[in-house]
């Protein structure tokens, strides 16, 4: 940017952008700091120096296995999944113009749980006395199909039947209730070991992610981020209403359906690999809206980083709170997210 161009920009606007970029930078530093701590934290005492030596390929074999096979993919999966879920929630809330829209409230997570339960009940779960998943690939694929089924039903109603954004949210609630009912029936007819496997899958666990899973999640999250950021001005226009956005030349239906599909796809992949992780996609965007505002140039990356920080922090708490027992990260994210969301609601309504 030339000096003449810079001089034409008001100082107030420069302060406005610097503040938001500072928040994004601090979130990035927080993610890196928590990532380093997450790799060190655990029942096996590993120092930062050992972590560095492992990354350089000079550590002992036992340390190498713990970091490369367990802790590093787990921590990276938490960051990537948290970013994907939070960005998906941010876009869903914008295109549906509903602050309660999120992957969990739209029934996508429940669809994944239902698909996984069907696969486990039909034989992909344990058949003996040991609680385990005999065919994790089949369970993951079934969970993905369940999540996308909920998405496609909502998009079908919007595209073919002309359902309004409010109706899309209600459709998601109805689909979530339907999948929850099917899940209850499957749990009722499943054997004791299959029931335990179903419940275990629904807990949510970033430790399930392998390097191959992580690559798929990361690739889709990057693609979604690029698309969302490329449409940042369209999302800004949508916040003023459909009529205003159309007046500005935005293809509202296309932007809404494409954004919903891509956000749901990112959610479906993350949930199918890791299980149900609630509140990240709902709380992350709301926190950042209060800090950086509703400008999607800054809100999308900020919400993504906030989601990564929240899920990584939840995983650290899950692994260290009652170590060596590892608590379900989905439960921890709900414990952390629910009170925080209620606090944000109280602060927001208190200003009206």
Image: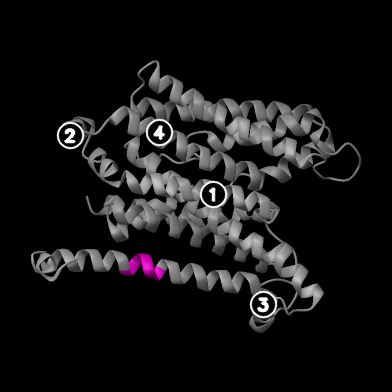
Q: Which residue is tagged 3?
A: 56
Question: In the depicted view, which residue is nearer to us: 67 or 133?
Answer: 67
Q: Which residue is tagged 2?
A: 244
The answer to whether mark 1 and mark 4 are in CB contact below 8 A is no
Disc 4, SS: helix
Question: In the depicted view, which residue is nearer to us: 248 or 206?
Answer: 248
Q: Residue furthest bottom?
A: 49
Q: Nearer the viewer, mark 2 or mark 4?
A: 4
> Which segment did they paint magenta?
22-26
Mark earlier in primary sequence (1, 4): 1
Question: Which residue is depicted at the point 72% across and 28% down?
Answer: 186
Whether residue 241 is situated above or below residue 130 in the rendered picture: above
On residue 258, the disc is: 4
For disc 2, the neighbor class at 10 Å (few under 14, some 14 to 19, many from 20) is few
On residue 114, the disc is: none
Disc 3, SS: loop
Question: Which residue is depicted at the point 53% across and 28% down?
Answer: 150
Whether residue 31 is situated above or below residue 257 in the rendered picture: below
Q: Classify residue 182 by image quadrant.
A: top right
Mark earlier in primary sequence (2, 1): 1
What's the distance in space between the residues labelled 3 and 1, CA to CA? 25 Å
Whether residue 8 is situated above or below residue 199 in the rendered picture: below
Q: State the scheme by which the image is colored.
A: one colour
Q: Quadrant of the N terminus?
A: bottom left
What's the distance in space between the residues labelled 1 and 4, CA to CA? 18 Å
Q: Classify residue 26 by image quadrant.
A: bottom left
């Amino acid at each position: 940017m030339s000096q003449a161009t810079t001089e034409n920009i008001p100082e107030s606007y420069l302060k406005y952008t610097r503040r938001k970029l500072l928040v994004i930078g601090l979130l990035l530093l927080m993610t890196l700091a928590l990532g380093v701590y997450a790799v060190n934290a655990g029942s096996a005492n590993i120092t930062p120096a050992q972590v560095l030596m492992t990354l350089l390929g000079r550590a002992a074999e036992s340390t190498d296995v713990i970091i490369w096979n367990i802790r590093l993919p787990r921590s990276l999966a938490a960051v990537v999944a948290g970013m994907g879920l939070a960005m998906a929630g941010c876009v869903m809330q914008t295109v549906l113009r509903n602050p309660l829209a999120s992957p969990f409230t739209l029934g996508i997570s429940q669809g994944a749980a239902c698909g996984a339960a069907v696969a486990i009940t039909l034989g992909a779960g344990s058949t003996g006395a040991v609680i385990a998943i005999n065919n994790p690939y089949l369970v993951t694929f079934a969970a993905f199909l369940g999540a996308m089924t909920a998405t496609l039903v909502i998009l079908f109603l919007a595209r073919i039947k002309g359902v309004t954004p409010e109706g899309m949210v209600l459709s998601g609630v109805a689909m979530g209730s339907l999948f929850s009912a099917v899940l209850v029936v499957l749990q009722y007819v499943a054997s004791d070991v299959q029931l335990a496997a179903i419940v275990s899958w629904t807990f949510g666990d970033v430790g399930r992610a392998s390097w191959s899973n992580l690559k798929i999640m990361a690739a889709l999250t990057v693609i979604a981020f690029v698309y969302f950021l490329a449409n940042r001005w369209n999302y800004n226009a949508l916040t003023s209403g459909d009529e205003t956005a159309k007046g500005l030349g935005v293809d509202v239906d296309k932007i809404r359906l494409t954004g919903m599909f891509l956000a749901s796809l990112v959610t479906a992949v993350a949930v199918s690999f890791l299980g149900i992780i609630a509140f990240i996609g709902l709380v992350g965007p709301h926190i950042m809206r209060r800090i950086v505002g509703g400008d999607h140039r800054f809100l999308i990356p900020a919400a993504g980083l906030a989601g990564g920080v929240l899920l990584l922090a939840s995983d650290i708490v899950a692994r260290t709170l009652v170590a060596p027992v590892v608590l379900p990260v989905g439960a921890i994210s709900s414990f952390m997210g629910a009170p925080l969301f209620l606090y944000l609601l109280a602060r927001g309504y208190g200003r009206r």
